[in-house]
Image (cartoon, helix red, strand yellow):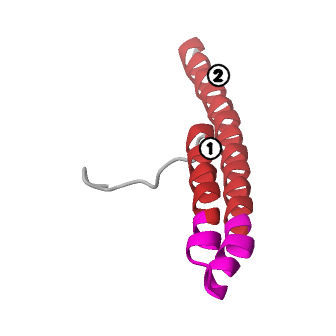
Amino acid sequence: MGRNDKFPFAMTKKSLVVYIASIVLIGPLLFFVRGDMAGKYAACIACPMIIVYLIYAYCKESKADMKAQETKVQYMAAILKALNGMRNM
């Protein structure tokens, strides 16, 4: 990997709250300001779907983070056990 490779933004609790708050603020704007059918559709259907997807993505990423942490601990324990075994030889 090069130095300029970009990683996707991590989904933290703070970013989840910011995303949901921005969508909640955009919803009434789409519903009242842009009052045509597309605006009402976006405010009533698309915005809640986006919020549900963001919550799903956060839960999925937090589970993956916990699993990665458990795996890291297991690998570190195996490495330390192997090093202690080599030292005793």
Residue drawn at (56%, 77%), measured in percent from left and top?
34
Instruction: For the C terminus, give its image quadrant.
Output: top right
Q: Amino acid at mark 2?
A: Lys
For the point 61% across and 49% down, which residue is it?
21
Residue 65: give its label: none
Q: How many marks?
A: 2
Quarter of image, res 52 = bottom right
Residue 39 location (% of width, % of height): 62, 79
Residue 24, percent from left and from top: 64, 56
Q: Which disc, if any, is residue 17?
A: 1
Could you tell which of marks 1 and 2 lies nearer the N-terminus?
Answer: 1
- Determine whether the residue tagged by mark 2 lies in a helix, strand or loop: helix
Of helix, strand and loop, which one carries label 1? helix
| Residue 13 in picture, x, y percent from top left | 63, 39
Crowding at mark 2 (Cα within 10 Å: few <14, some 14-19, many 20+): few
Q: Which region of the structure is painted magenta?
A: 29-48
How much space separates mark 1 and mark 2, taking CA atoms? 42 Å
**Mark 1 belongs to which amino acid?**
Val
- Magenta span dominant secondary structure: helix
- Vertical relation: 67 (above or below) 43: above
